[in-house]
Image (spheres, coloured by chain):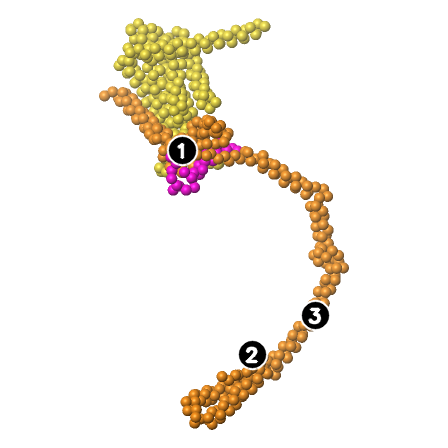
Amino acid sequence: MNKLHFKVGLFAAASLVLAAVFIVYLLHARGFFEKTFHLQLAAASADGVAPGVPVVFSGIEIGRVTTLGLNENGGIIIHTEFLSRNAKWLKENSSFTLDKPIVGGAKIRVDSPDLRAPALPDNATMLLLTSDISKEIPALVERVKAILANVEYLTRKDGEINATLANVKTVTGRMTGEYGVLEGVLGSPEKARAVTDSLDKTRALIAKLDAMTAKTDQWLFAQDGMAEQTKASLAQVRLMLNDAQSSLKKADAVMANAVEISANVKDGTQDIAKLRAEIDDAVRKANGLINEINKKWPFAREPEVKLP
Amino acid sequence: MNFLAASIESLGAKVVGWFTVGYGMFAFLAKAGLLLLEPATWNRATFDVVVKQIYFTAVQILHVFLGYALVISWLIITIILSTARDFGLTEFASEMTIRVLVLELLPFLTALFVALRSGSAINTEVALMQVNNELDALAHCKVPPMQFEFLPRLIGGVVSVVTLAGLAGLLALLMGYLAIYGMNVAGFEPYTRTIAKIFDFRIMAGLIAKCALFGLAVTLIPVTAGLETPKKLFMVPVSVLRGMMRVFFAIVAIEVVSLALKYI
């Protein structure tokens, strides 16, 4: 075996195999084994679009512009080409926007808001929108100019801002005086003094009020004060209420008797008259009791017990 | 006045000299091309010389060359990646790497490598054969030197430079992938997209043509420079010097023209 020939043969074979693999890989990468998908984009202007301009979806290139030309009505038709594996990103509700950044080349951006929408058919025609930053710049510059003019007007000599600043200066100057911020706010030391005087008076008044409150406290809550007396009255009221309750219980028993008795009215007319007198007496007592309570305690109710 | 006339005369002599050299080279190339078309050239003996030439030019140096390509690719890829990261241009890093290495730098370095190693050897050999009248002797023995000495060297040079540059390029592509995405297959899709974007038909044809021209330059120029050698032994180093200078200029000219065609 010729060693030299073997080595060269090995080298040639390896190189050829690698070259073949690379070429097949390249053909695959460029979509030679795939169908291409075509899409027409209708635009008002082809400014910045040229063959080779990429079509990007989410920042990734999925296709390119192949040719562009005019249609019968003077509109621009841009022909784009996609590999069929990338065509799935083109939906019927996709929007196509021509992006022309200030730095970098133009590109056509595809936005598919709903990926479940039906796919675009081959050779479809869609509208191309334009978002041209460079066109917005003049308008922007105009507005900035207007703003700058305003700022200039505000900050001119003898302008409002200067006057305001001068005022602020006098106010802060006063604030450094004897009466500090008060003087700054009120304008002169005299006025500030008046305020401090009235503050002093208020302080004296509060001291007096304090003393009065202490006295009131004494009067209300000391031994034999108002509160103590009220408590005693309340105990009395409770006793009276107990009394009334027992009277009412008696009346209840009497009423039960009355029901029994009323079955034999003929015999019991005498009894009923007596019973009536007794009940009236009990009710009078209860009314009196309630009036008594009312005197001691201000109920907001009609002080009357009515008989049925 | 005399000085002016003398300088114009020397300029004219130089221009005539360039033209003579250029004409000689292209005439030689045309002869070689015509010979290639003749069926009689395609015989076993010529093929054997071609194989030997490829062995000496490409196979013998393959491991050294690939190691050298590996180191330089790794260095340049790392530099490009870190610079791109610093400037926030990472998305262009892979494309930049491939363009710089595979399309420009590696073919150029391959041509220089082969020129320095094989080109200088061919120049010396042909010059010595010329000085020692060996070429006339061969022709006398019905062994035409064009068919058995020069044409195989041209073919070997072209095949070697194209293959070596291709292998180095593939190695650089692999290194670029490893440097950017590491040892996983996640980056295959975007890397494929980048490669597809760069290598269209025009670029591939241009790359192969450029490598072939490099291969031709590093063998054709030394052969013609050697043939020009006057029959004096001390003229051999001068012949090699001239040949190597021409090879260098030719390589730079090919690179510049290819860049101009690609980007202008």
Instruction: Indicate which label's residue lies in the foreground, 2 or 3.
Output: 2
Q: Please name whichever residue, A260 or A176, is drawn nearer the observer in this view of the structure.
A: A260
Q: Residue furthest right?
A: A190
Question: Which stretch appears magenta?
Answer: A92-121
Above or below A284: residue B83: above
Q: Position of residue B120 (x, y in %)?
A: 39, 16
Residue A25 picture quarter? top left
Q: Chain of mark 3?
A: A
Disc number placed over residue A60 in the picture, else none: none
Q: Position of residue B202 (x, y in %)?
A: 40, 23
Residue A224 falls inside the magenta stretch:
no
Disc number placed over residue A205 in the picture, else none: 3
Magenta part mainly helix, strand or loop?
loop
- At 68% from the left and 41% from the top, the residue drawn is A153
Q: Secondary structure at mark 3?
A: helix
Residue B152 picture quarter? top left
Q: Chain of mark 1?
A: A
Q: Please name whichever residue, B222 or A83, is drawn nearer the observer in this view of the structure.
A: A83
Is residue B110 visible in the rendered image? The answer is no
* Badge 3 and badge 1 in a common chain: yes
Spatial separation of the CA atoms under disc 3 and disc 1? 91 Å
What's the residue type where badge 3 is placed?
Leu
| Residue B166 in the figure: left or right of residue A68 | left
